[in-house]
Amino acid sequence: MDFLTFTAEEEVKISLMDEQHEQMTHVINKIYTAFILKKSRTVQSQLKILLALLRKHFDYEESLMKQTQFEGYYSHKLEHDRFYKKVEVVYNSYLDKKPKLTLEELYNVKSWFFNHIEIKDKICGDHFAKHGIT
């Protein structure tokens, strides 16, 4: 069973955003599995992939917010920046051979991911759709 499951319930109805969320879900599942199996190099490589996906996704979403003059841009971007930094710190801990990832942290990632989609991204999705973005 997967650690995270991305279903139609989580979709924001903006096709590229949903594809990116789904890609991130797969990578987080790989991180979780590697962590449980104590495969540190796999965790590290998947964290690097996750960071790249996060950067691409956040940049895309933030560009749409600017393009459509989304009112909640600054608070939403701040959430992105904080989460990215958190994942980056964990990734860097693997590079330094002093891993900081814990099971609790993985569950925090899971919670953040779904809460952010449910509370913030769905609002963005509705806003983008009103501006003709699908």
Image (spheres, helix red, strand yellow):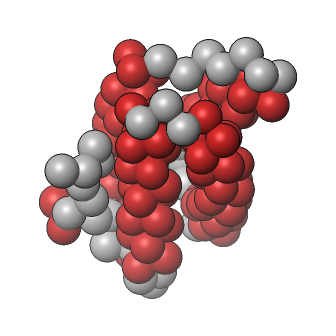
Where is residue 111? Give x, y as percent: 33, 31
Residue 55 visible, this orientation: yes
Q: Quadrant of residue 95?
A: top right
Where is residue 77? Give x, y as percent: 63, 40
Question: From the viewer's perspective, is 9 left or right of 10?
Answer: left
Locate the C terminus by quadrant: bottom left
Q: Quadrant of residue 92?
A: top right
Q: Residue at x 47, y 18 (%)?
A: 102
Q: Is 128 situated above or below 83?
A: below
Q: Is 20 situated above or below 133?
A: above
- Nearer to me, 19 or 119: 19
Q: How many marks are shown on the rendered structure?
A: 0
Residue 89 visible, this orientation: no
Where is residue 19? Give x, y as percent: 43, 73
Question: From the viewer's perspective, is 25 left or right of 50?
Answer: left
Question: From the viewer's perspective, is 133 left or right of 61?
Answer: left
- Nearer to me, 112 or 77: 112
Q: Residue at x 41, y 79 (%)?
A: 15
Q: Is 5 situated above or below 47?
A: below
Where is residue 49? Give x, y as percent: 65, 55
